[in-house]
Amino acid sequence: MSAVLQTPTRGVAEVIDMPWHAFGATSGAWTLHPRVLADFDPFVMVDHFVMPDAVFAPHPHAGFSAVTYLFDDSEGGVRNRDSFGTANDILPGALHWTQAGRGMVHEELPSVPGRAAHGLQIFVNSARANKQVPPAAFHLTPDQVPLVEARGATVRVVLGDFGGAVSRIGAHTAVTLLDITLAPHGRLDVPLPRSQQAFAVVVRGGLDGVTAAGAHALRFDAAGDAIALAAGADGARLVLLAGEPLREPVFTHGPFVGNDAADVAAMIRRYQAGQMGALAPTVPA
């Protein structure tokens, strides 16, 4: 297949620093918490985490989806449990999508303490009409993720479609998630409708012509029909995220995402009343 398309391309509109937030002595995340959520709609935030020992004890979510993607070279996995019966290990290369809907409680911890889980946690918003649906979970094992190889690039098609490969789940907010590795000076154009907003979390290396002091993300403009990627001398690995904007008001408060303050207040009341279920914390072995 040809890696470069003859079509107007979308450039970098903004380079965004991702500061480190420590969870503990050795665990933490480079965080992308956008100041202008409308520029990233339907996404709310992304944490690029390294987690050998941190434990996220049972905590609630409502009004959005918490999506965990582990890189295929992650040293360890994540043990995931929730209040509607899910209990599984998210293995390196896998994706787990927790669609919180009207509310649930979940817990996340390293599958094997000391073996660092490395990946992304992504908050994907739900439209107003879907904020009250029952919770649901969707899972992709590593072998269910298609791999597309092009000259100078490899792409794990985790969600969406690229190069003839398609990956879909049943979540109500459809997004694209492509894990892209570029060789030194490698190039790749990714077709994407102008109606979709797109950004990328740079995992290592960087794109040619982009100056950044450390961990960073790139927000793309909408001036073309494809995103043009060209790696610098060290190559690059990045995760491209894109989706159709919901174009609704967004009000966030900790683990809750509503359309306004009244929505979030109602979510808090449901949680305090036990209507999001209960989950006893894992007892260390």
Image (spheres, rainbow, N blue to C red):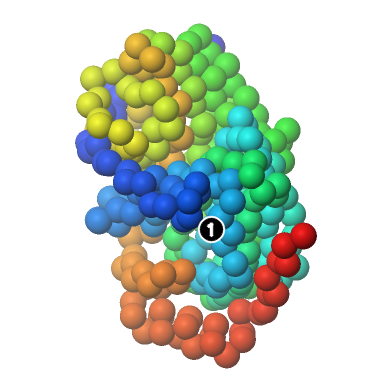
- What residue did someone put label 1 on? 66
The residue at 48%/51% (across/down) is 25
Using the image as rendered, state which of residue 183 and residue 31 is in the foreground. 31
The residue at 35%/28% (across/down) is 227
Residue 179 in the image: state x and y as whole percent.
Answer: 51, 31
Q: Quadrant of residue 260?
A: bottom left
Residue 242 in the image: state x and y as whole percent.
Answer: 42, 42
In the rendered image, the quadrant that contains the N terminus is top right
In the rendered image, the quadrant that contains the C terminus is bottom right
Mark 1: which amino acid? Ala
The residue at 32%/37% (across/down) is 216
Where 96 falls versus 16 (above or below)?
below
Mark 1 neighbour density, 10 Å: few (under 14) some (14–19) many (20 or more): many
Using the image as rendered, state which of residue 198 and residue 203 is in the foreground. 203
Horizontal relation, residue 56 to residue 216: left or right: right
Residue 282 in the image: state x and y as whole percent.
Answer: 71, 66
Q: Quadrant of residue 211?
A: top left
Where 111 falls versus 216 (above or below)?
below
Asked whether residue 138 is in view, the answer is: no
Horizontal relation, residue 285 to residue 160: left or right: right
Using the image as rendered, state which of residue 182 and residue 148 is in the foreground. 182
The residue at 67%/57% (across/down) is 80
Q: Residue furthest front?
A: 25
Asked whether residue 180 is in view, the answer is: yes
Badge 1 marks a residue whose secondary structure is strand
Where 13 falls versus 8 (above or below)?
below
Residue 46 in the image: state x and y as whole percent.
Answer: 42, 50
Q: Quadrant of residue 136?
A: bottom right
Q: How many discs appear? A: 1
